Structures are given as C-alpha cells and as structure tokens.
Image (spheres, coloured by chain):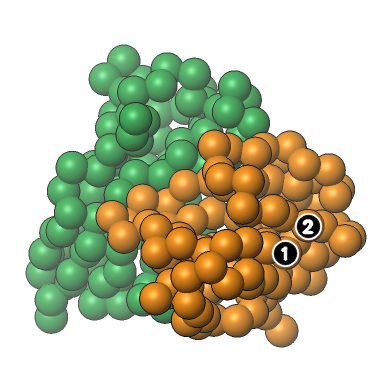
Chain colours: A green, B orange
Amino acid sequence: DQQVKQNSPSLSVQEGRISILNCDYTNSMFDYFLWYKKYPAEGPTFLISISSIKDKNEDGRFTVFLNKSAKHLSLHIVPSQPGDSAVYFCAASGSNSGYALNFGKGTSLLVTP
Amino acid sequence: DTAVSQTPKYLVTQMGNDKSIKCEQNLGHDTMYWYKQDSKKFLKIMFSYNNKELIINETVPNRFSPKSPDKAHLNLHINSLELGDSAVYFCASSQDLRPYGYTFGSGTRLTVV
C-alpha cells in the first residue's frame, strides 16, 4: 500500500521556467512533509519541508505548498536551472509511523537550456 | 569528511552467501536508519535505531539483522542472500526521532547472482 504517490514519473522544463512537481498522500495522520533531491549514484539530499500546520514554505527558488483537505502537496522551482535536473522524492511522516519517512516513487526532472 | 558513509558502495555476491554493509555517521546524531530502494524505485524504511535501541523494525525477513555497536554505527547483516534482495540500500541518520534533517549515505548497490 503506497501511502505517498507521485504520479508523474518524469517532467521536462525549459531553463528559466517554473517546474511544478506534485505529490498525493493517503494517510491523514501524516503531519510532516519533505522533498528530497537525488542525483545518480548519490543518496537523497534534503531540499525543503513543511509542517501540517502550514500551507506554504519558501526557501529561495523552492516553494512547497500543502493542501491538507486534498491531501496534496507540490514543489515549485522558480526559475528552473539545468543543475536542478535530478529525481525529486516526496516524503511524508507522522508520529503513528515512528516518524519514518514514507517516500513516493520519485519524479525525474529535466531542465533543458 | 563524509557525514554518513557506507561501505561497500557496490556488492556482487552469490545466492546463499552472508554479507554485511557498514554505516557510520560523524554528525553526532542519535538516530540511524536503513532504507531499501527496490527495482521499482520505492524507498522503504527497514529499521531505525535511536541511541543503539531498535525503534522501527518493518516487515523485513529475519535474514536481515541490524547491529548498532554505538550510536555512530549501524551495520546491516544479511544471511542466506536471495535474488530478491538485490536493491540499493541507503543508510541515514537524524538528530533524533523526528524526521527533520535526515542525512543519507550514498547507498550500497547489492546484486545477488
């Protein structure tokens, strides 16, 4: 049972444009959400997070939006840069799961010059 | 100075063998984890340890046994390896049990032939 879903396996965006990566979750007990970025042959690196008490968190070019009623979150990257090309994983966590991270399958982002 | 280091990076072994993957973190974190990324790219929690105490033990065959000699190390021993164990195994650490600021290792690609 996949509790975190990223339904777009890949996304291609032109440099300078906005990249929007989407994530849906099913477990209403999740109260903390994170985005990780992963390059080939490396481990995931933390990008940005949001608590369930907020609906938006911004860090530089990266903004995460949370819609709890829809159980949906999204990551916006503006402006997109070629160095942003990587696999992006959405993850969710809650006290009822011992705060383990439940990951989505990832979305491969390609930013073209 | 790698924050979370795993060895080996690649491991090819025959079915039925016993192998170990080592993990060390120099971040002073209290909690360490093992995650498995299977062929479908799902990243799933296997184990977590907090101050050498087992916290999470997901539905993992008992051929997999984590060992934490101290809070900076969490090793993974796998007995009687099977073809289905082929995956990338990621070690991670966090300051405490909360999901903030996970740091992942670069992964160990295990191939069972």
A73 relative position to B93: left or right? left
Verify CB contact (< 8 Å) between mark 2 and mark 1: yes
The residue under label 1 is: B75
Residue B76: horizontal and vertical position, in percent?
A: 67, 62
Q: CA distance from mark 2 to mark 1?
A: 5 Å
Vertical relation: A112 (above or below) B64: below
A85 relative position to B38: left or right? left
Query: In the structure shown, which secondary structural element does the residue marked by tag 1 occupy?
Result: strand
Residue A33: horizontal and vertical position, in percent?
A: 46, 37
User: What amino acid is labelled 1 in the image?
Assistant: Asn
Residue A3's disc number: none
Which residue, as the protein is rendered here, is positioned at the far right?
Answer: B70
Quadrant in the picture for residue A70? top left
The residue under label 2 is: B67
Quadrant in the picture for residue A112? bottom left
Quarter that holds the C terminus of chain A: bottom left
User: What amino acid is labelled 2 in the image?
Assistant: Lys
Which residue is nearer to you in this view: A102 or B95?
Answer: A102
Residue B59: horizontal and vertical position, in percent?
A: 54, 37
Quarter that holds the N terminus of chain A: top left
Please say whether residue A105 is visible from this viewpoint.
yes
Residue B37: horizontal and vertical position, in percent?
A: 42, 58
Mark 2 vs 1, N-terminal side: 2
Marks 2 & 1 on one chain: yes
Which residue, as the protein is rendered here, is positioned at the far front?
Answer: B16
> What's the residue at 48%, 25% (across, down)?
A30
> What's the residue at 23%, 62% (across, down)?
A108
Which residue is nearer to you in this view: B57 or A34?
Answer: B57
> What's the residue at 43%, 72% (across, down)?
B112
Vertical relation: A10 (above or below) A31: below
